[in-house]
Structures are given as C-alpha cells and as structure tokens.
Amino acid sequence: MLDAGGTIRVGLAVYRIAQRRIRVIGSSAWPMADGRIFNSAIGRDEWQGWAIELTYSYSAFGEYYSGKYFRGFRRKKNAEAFLERFSRDTPIPVRYKAEKPEVSTLLPADMSLLLAGIES
C-alpha cells in the first residue's frame, strides 16, 4: 500500500507522462525550427530512477521561444551519456505548433543521429 507521499509521486509521474503524450500527438507534422540547448540538468526521478531536463530556445515567425524536455532513465550512466550529447549551445531540431508557436517539443525521431546508442 502506498503512503500519501507515494500516491502523490505516482500521480505526478502519471500526469507528466500524460502531459508529454498529449503534447506530442500529431507533432511529427508540426513545422521544424533550429533550436539550441541553453541549459541541462540531471536529477533523481521517483518513477524511473534518473531524469534529465533540457531547456532549449528556438525562433518561429521572427519571435524567440523556449521549452523544456524531460526524459527518464533507469541508469545514471545512461542519463549522463545523454547529457554529454546535449551540452550548452548544441543545435537541436524543435517541433512547434504553427498556430501556437510557443508550444513545442523535441522528438526522439528528429534527434536520432544524436541519440544513437543511448538506452533509457
């Protein structure tokens, strides 16, 4: 049986996963912009063990925007290997919603060359 804290952590993890899934539905058809990583971090994740957070910027329709990308890993060394490939100023393909350009995401399929060989 989960305690109140465990229930909250599970609820937050499910919310994060659902939020990410909703955001990427249909996003492979969104326009692509050239983005850049401007911050990255690694931390403990109650759900998968380790998590990374990338903060990126991109330009759409002459305006600058930023977004965050989260990804969980079972092993710390895999999270660290991921971050090594996405250091500050690394160019990154960003998908953004044309009618609402402040909504964006990073798709693993778009980053496939940079992600080759990294496990979750």
Image (cartoon, rainbow, N blue to C red):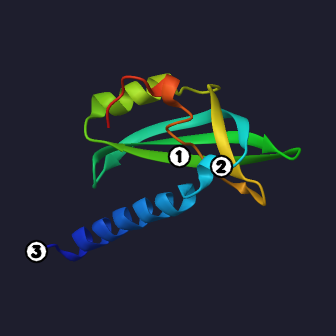
Q: For mark 1, what is the residue? A: 69
Mark 1 and mark 2: Cα distance apart in space: 18 Å
Q: For mark 2, what is the residue? A: 29
Asked whether the residues under the numbered discs 3 and 1 touch, taking CB atoms below 8 Å apart as contact, a structural biologist would say: no
Q: Residues within 10 Å of mark 3 (few under 14, many from 20)?
A: few
Residue furthest left as drawn = 1
Closer to the eye: label 1 or 2: 2
Q: For mark 3, what is the residue? A: 1
Vertically, is 46 above or below 2?
above
Mark 3 and mark 1: Cα distance apart in space: 32 Å
Residue furthest right as drawn = 62
Residue sitting at x 36%, y 27%? 118
Q: Quadrant of the C terminus?
A: top left
Q: Residues within 10 Å of mark 2 (few under 14, many from 20)?
A: few
Residue 70 drawn at (x, y percent): 47, 47
Label 3: state its secondary structure.
loop
Mark sitting earlier along the chain (3/1): 3
Quarter occupied by residue 76: top left
Residue sitting at x 36%, y 45%? 72
Closer to the eye: label 3 or 2: 2
2 or 92: nearer the eye? 92
Residue 68 drawn at (x, y percent): 57, 48
Q: Residues within 10 Å of mark 1 (few under 14, many from 20)?
A: some
Q: Label 3 amino acid?
A: Met
Task: Return the mark for residue 81.
Answer: none
Label 1: state its secondary structure.
strand
Asked whether the residues under the numbered discs 3 and 2 touch, taking CB atoms below 8 Å apart as contact, a structural biologist would say: no
Quarter occupied by residue 18: bottom left
Vertically, is 88 above or below 26?
above
Label 2: state its secondary structure.
helix
Residue 5 drawn at (x, y percent): 25, 71
Determine whether, in the image, residue 4 is placed left or right of residue 106.
left
